[in-house]
Image (cartoon, rainbow, N blue to C red):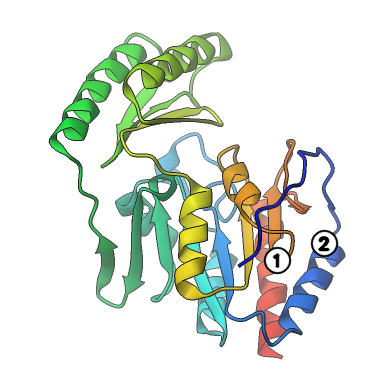
Amino acid sequence: MSEPSTGTPSARPDASVPSLHAALADVLADPHARPLLVALDFDGTLAPLQDDPQLSRILPAGVDVLARLAAADGVELALVSGRAMADLHALAEVPPGTFLVGSHGAERARVTRFGLDRDVVQLTDEQADRLATLGAQAAQVARGRDGVWVETKPTAVVVHTRLAEPDVAEPAEAEAVALGERLGSGVLHGKDVVEISVLHASKGEALQALRGELGAPVVLYAGDDVTDEHAFAALGDRDLTVKVGAGTTVARFRLDSPETVVSALAHLARTLGA
């Protein structure tokens, strides 16, 4: 297993698509680098960001590419998302055999021909009570603020501000962070969102656990959000970490959009097929 990266954040990782292709070719040329775990964020990585999260859909070309990757020998496929598991499964359109990691690592399942084979999340009575309290107090944060709304997940409460004006969103996010520091076990502050969990979870820990179970020497991980930095930082120097879009990052490579991500995955699928 690779050691976690010690790279420092940079606004300018390698933005060259040929460089990413060359790194992939090096990995595929090594017979000891299998299985390759291809793990991907969903929103902003495979699906263009939408003001209404329920309108998010994977790019049509991405559906075919993921099916080809899932069918390739020596490749394991996973989506790693902040979305609740049921929501992720409903929107993702992924092939059987795909691992789904939801709620930033708190939920996990594998897609089968007949639905989801899920790891059941168990909350203690204290955690369940705290989740209910968080939901009620988060509703107070959103009340009277246009464009601010609350989502309840099996292990967390999320305050969304994507639809709010900046002068409304900023104080709402600050109050949500303060609420999480009082009542949560973990607070994740991403793009226009504050998630307060009653369980400790992170994309990085979930990704490392999955690679360990699969025995994957190399991981390709792509994501666009602040929370994806936890995954980038947890991976090693040989792993292929890809920041999607602008922003400071510890990732090795950068792609500018979901369309470019799908194009890079299509190149990988063609190379595997050859």
Q: Is residue 35 above or below residue 107?
A: below
> How many discs appear?
2
Q: What amino acid type is highlighted by mark number 2?
A: Val
Residue 226: image x %, image y %? 60, 37
**Do the CB atoms of the residues marked 2 and 1 lie less than 8 Å apart?**
yes
Q: Residues within 10 Å of mark 2 (few under 14, many from 20)?
A: some
Q: Quadrant of the C terminus?
A: bottom right
In the displayed structure image, the side of residue 61 where residue 77 appears, left or right = left
Q: Secondary structure at mark 1?
A: helix
Q: Quadrant of the N terminus?
A: bottom right
Q: Position of residue 257 (x, y in %)?
A: 69, 50
Q: Amino acid at mark 1?
A: Ser
Query: Which numbered disc covers residue 263?
Result: 1
Q: CA distance from mark 2 to mark 1?
A: 10 Å
Q: Which numbered circle lies on residue 17?
A: 2
Residue 26 visible at all: yes
Please state the horizontal and vertical placement of residue 267, each as a whole percent of the image.
Answer: 72, 74
Q: Residue at x 23, y 30 (%)?
A: 131
Q: Nearer the viewer, residue 264 or 210?
A: 210
Residue at image position (77%, 40%) is 8
Residue 109 higher or lower than 271, as above or below: above
Q: In this view of the protein, can residue 80 be seen by the observer?
A: no
